[in-house]
Amino acid sequence: MRVFDEKINGVKHRIIEFRSLG
């Protein structure tokens, strides 16, 4: 489940970066 958690965190980080970019 650790890999799954890392994937979720990666997606959240990408969304945050995308929002701050726009």
Image: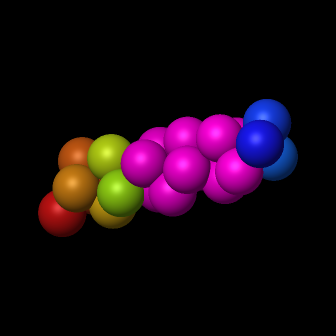
Q: Indicate whether residue 13 is drawn in magenta.
A: yes
Residue 7 position in % (x across, y down):
66, 53
Q: Is residue 15 visible?
A: yes
In this rendered view, identify the residue nearer to me: 14 or 4.
Answer: 4
Residue at 43% from the left image edge and 48% from the top image edge: 12
In this rendered view, identify the residue nearer to me: 1 or 14.
Answer: 1
Residue 18 position in % (x across, y down):
33, 60
Indicate the quadrant containing the C terminus: top left, top right, bottom left or bottom right. Answer: bottom left
Residue 1, image quadrant: top right
Q: Is residue 17 visible?
A: no
Question: Where 19 falls versus 13 (above or below)?
Answer: below
**Horizontal relation, residue 13 to residue 6: left or right:** left
Residue 13 position in % (x across, y down):
47, 44
Most prominent secondary structure in the magenta stretch?
Answer: helix
Residue at the outermost front position: 1
What residue span does the magenta drawing correspond to? 4-14
Question: Where 7 falls versus 6 (above or below)?
Answer: below
